[in-house]
């Protein structure tokens, strides 16, 4: 998701700014308001800007409510000033859920207010397996990871196998880390032997 936002901004010729959930854990800690204010200030003064709000469903809900005004209006109020929004300011928010709260895999996620969800167009972002190959640059390893992902899904195993397993594993293999160790560290991540074997038995 981050890679897409960065490339989108680059191709469009826009400035790119990044905010993670911990930056707005609440309206008044971690410098969240200062950071958002600075971004809006820059968007007002400079060329078009894309703000990428990562892990929005892990942010403090009251802080996101305060952010809603900036998405819907031409300004955002802060304790010390009002910051106008540039006409070509855009926000992309990424989440691992659809904003409806924690699920069986993402247990630390918050439910987002309906007003927040209504401000965004929602895209269900599937894994691009061709891009996964291009980023990792190790066909045999990525093919193995993708087979494991499909097998885990087939048997209903609640284990996340994301493209990070492909990219991190490929990096470790390139520097000479043992293949079995790589599998354990980036693919299986704590699964017990019986569950790993069940996935392998369904990889085909």
Image (tube, grey):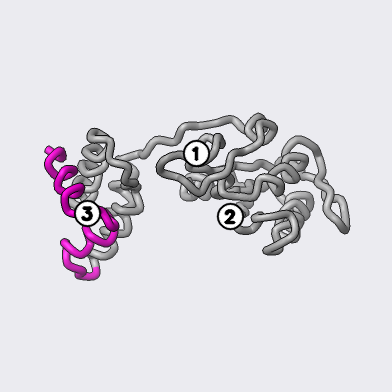
Does residue 110 appear left or right of residue 113 in this picture?
A: left
Marks 2 and 3, Cα distance to the nearest angstrom? 32 Å
Q: Residue furthest bottom?
A: 176
Q: Position of residue 86 (x, y in %)?
A: 76, 44
**SS for callout 2:** loop
Does residue 115 appear left or right of residue 204 in this picture?
A: right
Q: Which residue is mark 2?
A: 20
Q: Are the residues flagged by discs 3 and 1 in contact, CB closer than 8 Å?
A: no
Where 22 falls versus 57 (above or below)? below
Q: Are the residues flagged by discs 2 and 3 in contact, CB closer than 8 Å?
A: no
Front of the two marks 1 and 2: 1
Q: Position of residue 115 (x, y in %)?
A: 69, 32
Looking at the rendered structure, which numbered label has been put on residue 17?
A: none
Q: Is residue 198 magenta?
A: yes
Q: Which residues lie in the magenta part? A: 175-204
Q: Which residue is mark 3?
A: 192
Q: Which residue is mark 1?
A: 97
Front of the two marks 3 and 1: 3
Where 135 falls versus 149 (above or below)? below
Marks 1 and 2, Cα distance to the nearest angstrom? 16 Å
Q: Residue at horizontal 36%, vertical 39%?
A: 127
**SS for callout 1:** loop
Magenta highlight: main SS: helix
Q: Residue at horizontal 15%, vertical 40%?
A: 203
**SS for callout 3:** loop
**How many numbered badges does the structure rendering display?**
3
């Amino acid at each position: 998701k981050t890679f897409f936002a960065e490339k989108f901004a680059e191709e469009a010729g826009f400035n790119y700014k990044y905010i993670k959930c911990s930056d707005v854990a609440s309206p008044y800690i971690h410098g969240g308001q200062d950071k958002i204010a600075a971004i809006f200030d820059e968007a007002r003064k400079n060329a078009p800007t894309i703000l990428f709000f990562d892990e929005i469903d892990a942010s403090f809900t009251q802080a996101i409510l305060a952010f809603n005004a900036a998405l819907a209006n031409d300004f955002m109020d802060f304790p010390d000033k009002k910051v106008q929004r540039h006409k070509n300011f855009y926000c992309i928010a990424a989440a691992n859920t659809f904003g409806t709260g924690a699920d069986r895999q993402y247990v630390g996620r918050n439910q987002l207010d309906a007003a927040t969800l209504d401000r965004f167009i929602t895209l269900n972002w599937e894994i691009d397996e061709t891009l996964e190959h291009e980023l990792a640059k190790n066909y045999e390893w990525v093919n193995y990871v993708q087979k494991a992902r499909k097998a885990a899904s087939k048997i209903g195993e609640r284990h996340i196998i994301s493209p990070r397993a492909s990219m991190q594993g490929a990096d470790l293999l390139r520097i000479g880390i043992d293949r079995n160790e790589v599998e354990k560290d980036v693919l299986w991540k704590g699964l017990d032997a019986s569950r790993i074997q069940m996935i392998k038995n369904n990889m085909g």
